Amino acid sequence: MTTWEQAAPHMRPRRARGAEIPPTGPMTWRDQRKASMPKLVRQEVEGEGPAPAWKILGVSIDPDGFFALALFLPMLFIANIGALGAAAIAGSVPLYLFVRRERLTVVMLKRAVLFAVPLLAMFSVVWSEAPRESFKYAAELGLTVVAGLLLSSARNQTAVIRGLGLAFFAYVAAAILGGERVAIGVGAGGQAMSGLTESKNLLADIASTGFIISMSVTAMALARRNWMWAVFGIAAALLEFYAVMSARSAGAILGIAIGVGAMVGLLTLIAAGKAVRAFLTVLLAMMLLAVGLAHRWLAQAMIDLGATLFDKDPTLTGRTYLWYRAGDLIDEKPMLGRGFYAFWLQGNTDAEGLWRYFGIDSRGGFTFHNTAVEVLVMLGMVGLVVLSAVLVISVIALVRRFVDRPNLALVCWISLFLYQLCRMPIETIGLAPFYFSTALCFAALGAAFGRVDSKKVVRAAYRPQGPKIVKVWSVDDETPSWANPRWTPEPGSMRLLKDGTGRRR
C-alpha cells in the first residue's frame, strides 16, 4: 500500500487539521468526507447514566418497559389468579426498587407529598376496628404507590407506556376470547360483555384505560416514525374500543370522551407558545375544577346517559341506597373513620347486610362506588382533607410542568388522570391496593415532579496519539510572477515566513 509520503500530491485525500491521516488510494467523495471529519467521543460527567438495555436472545429490552409489563399484567389478571397475582406484584416491586436503587432517594424525596395517603392509611392502625387488616392493606397500598412513582419517574417514558399498552392489550384480547356475558338493564337491557369475570364495569374500565394508552403509543410512534408500533397502537385501540362498547358502560364511554378530548387538546398545546399554553392550560384546569365541584351534576349525567343508551337502572345499580347507608356509617365516626379497609370484612354485620342486599355471594370485592364516601367511611374527615390536599398540590405541579416542559408522555399521564378523575363520583379510585387504576393515578401525579436526571454529555474533538506528519512550506515575500510562482500550501501544513530582516520565523 502506498504511504502518505510516497503518494503523489494529487492522489492524497483531503484531511482536517489535527485529524488522522486517511488511507491513500482511490476514494469516493463520501469516503473522503467521512475520513476528514474529526472523530468525536462522549465524555460523561457525574450522575446516573441511561439504564442499560438487557440483552435477551439478542433482543434489547428496556428495564423500565419490562417492569411496566411485569407489574401490570398481574394487576389486570388479579381477579382471576388471586393470591398468585398479589405475590407476583409484591415480588416485582422490591426487584424494581433494586434496579433503580442508585437514584431512589432523590426520586422519592421529590414525590414525598404523595406518600401522605399511604402513611395515613398505615397510621389508621391505631384506631382501626380491624388493625391487622388495616396494616396489611396499607402496606400493599404503599407498594402500589411506589410502583406507580417509579414508572412515572423512569427516563425512558416511551418504553414504559409501550409496556403498559402491551399489558392492557393482552388482557382485553383474553377477555374478548373468554366471551363471558351478564344481563343488564331494567327493561329490554339485554346482555353486556364481562370478559374474564362477571363484572362488565371492570372490563369496561380496563378497556377504556387501555384505549387511552394505545392512543398515546400511536402518537409517540408517529412522532418517531416507528410504523410498527403505530400499527400496534391503532389495532389495540380498535380492539379496546370494541370491548368498551360491548360492555355497555356509560361511565367508561364518558371517561373515554373526556380522556381522549383532553389528549387532543394537550397535543395541540405542545406546539403553542409558553404564554398561550399557560393561559389555555389554566383555563382548562379551572373548567375541570368546576366540573369536580359539580360532581352531583356529573353523576346525574351518567345516570341519564346509562338510562338512555342502555336502559339501565336509574339508581346506578343501587348506588343511591349504598350512599344512603354510608351516610349513617359516617355519622357514627366522622373524624377518623373506621380504619383503612376495616369495613368490608366478613363478619362485619353492616357489610354482611349490604352484600346480602346486593346479592354479592362472594362477600368481597365491593365498595361504596364513590371515592369521597369511601374515604369518609375508612379515614373520616381527616382522610378526605389529606387526599384533597395531595390532589390539589399534585395537580398544580402537573399543570406547571406541562406549561414549562410539555411532551407526549406527560400528555398520556394527564389524560389518564383526567379519565380517573371523572369517574371518582361513581367509583372508588386511587385507594385499592394492587389495583391498576391506583398505580396509574399515582404514576400520573408523580409525573408532575419530573423524571430521573440524566447525565450531561460533553463532546470533545478526538486527539490522535503518536507523531503527526506535517509538511513544511517556505513562503517568500517576493512578488510572484510566471518565472517565480508562489506555491499554495496544503491545508494543515506549517508555514515559514520571512520578516523584514530576511530571517525566517
Image (spheres, grey):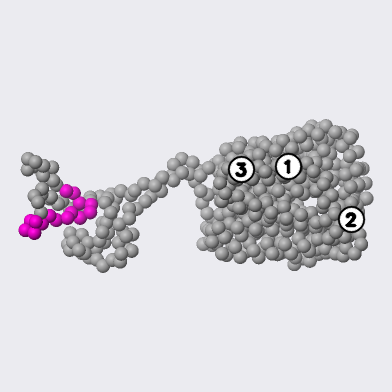
Which label is found at residue 278?
Answer: 3
Q: CA distance from mark 2 to mark 3?
A: 42 Å
Q: Earlier in the sequence, mark 2 or mark 3?
A: 3
For this rendering, which residue is in front, 222 or 18? Answer: 222
Image height check: is 311 above or below 429?
Answer: below
Q: Which residues are magenta?
A: 481-495
Q: Earlier in the sequence, mark 1 or mark 3?
A: 3
Position of residue 303 measured from the top left corner of the image (x, y, whole percent)? 85, 53
SS for dot 1: helix
10 Å crowding of disc 1: few (<14), some (14-19), many (20+): few
User: In percent of the image, x 14 and y 47: which residue is there?
Assistant: 496
From the image, state whether disc 1 or disc 3 is nearer to you.
Answer: 3
Q: CA distance from mark 2 to mark 1?
A: 28 Å
Image height check: is 349 above or below 75?
Answer: above
- Kindly tell me whether residue 263 is visible in this rendering: yes
For this rendering, which residue is in front, 465 or 492? Answer: 492
On the image, numbered disc 2 is attached to which residue? 313
User: The disc labelled 3 sits on which kind of residue?
Assistant: Ala
On the image, numbered disc 1 is attached to which residue? 289
Position of residue 86 measured from the top left corner of the image (x, y, whole percent)? 73, 50
Q: Earlier in the sequence, mark 2 or mark 1?
A: 1
